[in-house]
Image (spheres, coloured by chain):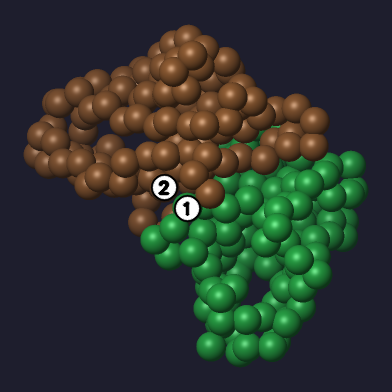
Chain colours: A green, B brown
Amino acid sequence: EPEVTQTPSHQVTQMGQEVILRCVPISNHLYFYWYRQILGQKVEFLVSFYNNEISEKSEIFDDQFSVERPDGSNFTLKIRSTKLEDSAMYFCASSEWPNEQYFGPGTRLTVT
Amino acid sequence: QKEVEQDPGPLSVPEGAIVSLNCTYSNSAFQYFMWYRQYSRKGPELLMYTYSSGNKEDGRFTAQVDKSSKYISLFIRDSQPSDSATYLCAMSAGRGSTLGRLYFGRGTQLTVWP
């Protein structure tokens, strides 16, 4: 069964460093998303991406965040200058049409 | 932000019990309703997906949506220890600029003991 994959599974970085989280969505899916989950809190929407552009972004997704689909298979989230409060699980999701979203296993980001 | 409310539990039941999980919401624009299962430190796994009001059944799982009450439920029949996980409700408006954006509940932690 096709699935969303994410790398790395765990990323440790120092405050102020740039990180890139990578995702390979399900191959026939057209809609891509990033969410995050701070420990003990709700899963929160960051951004949606369709037709090579951002469809919507949340208030969390400020100028330090960017997304890119550099080729036909990868979808990346870049955080330019990480802060302690960026520590969270980051989930990529994809869907063939909006709403029925399939999530990857997540990348645990730890900022020290 | 209190758009989706879900009792975090924990909920502990014996094997074979019927489990009822619920969420309420405030945004009447929500049209699509989902239930996800999440094991510790893993990604949410889509269990059920429904559109608008009504019931949907898939094996031991039944999802119900009551839009008039802004209330959704997930029932698990003949619960098994392997059902032990956190269950997340999620919903979206599905139109306009919010197309696809999911709003999640906090999740209910369920333990099914043998």
Name the side, left or right, on which A95 lies relative to B82. right
- The front one of B16 and A59 is A59
Question: Which residue is the site of mark 2?
Answer: B106
Q: Secondary structure at mark 2?
A: loop
Q: Compared to B63, does B102 lie above or below?
A: below
Q: Which residue is mark 1?
A: A42
Of all chains, the one bearing label 1 is: A
**Residue A84: percent from left, percent from top:** 56, 81
- Residue B39: tell me if it is visible: yes
Nearer to us in this view, B75 or B58 = B75
Question: Which amino acid, mark 2?
Answer: Arg
Quarter of the image where the N terminus of chain A is located: top right
Q: Which chain hosts label 2? A: B
Q: Residue B28, percent across and down?
A: 59, 24
Q: Residue at x 57, y 15 (%)?
A: B52
In the foreground, B26 or B56:
B26
- Residue drawn 62% across the image and 32% down it: B92
Snapshot quadrant of residue B72: top left
Q: Residue furthest top?
A: B54
Residue B102 coordinates in the image, percent (x, y): 61, 40
Relative to the observer, which residue lies in front, A41 or A96? Answer: A41
Q: Are marks 2 and 1 on the same chain?
A: no
Disc 2 residue crowd, few under 14, some 14–19, many 20+, Cα 10 Å: many
Residue at image coords 58%, 46%: A103
Where B81 falls versus A38 (above or below)? Answer: above
Which numbered tag is attached to residue A51? none
Mark 1 residue type: Lys
Task: Report whether residue B58 is seen.
Answer: no
In this picture, residue B100 sits left or right of residue A41: right
Residue in the picture at 44% in, 11% down = B55
Looking at the image, is B49 positioned above or below residue B108?
A: above
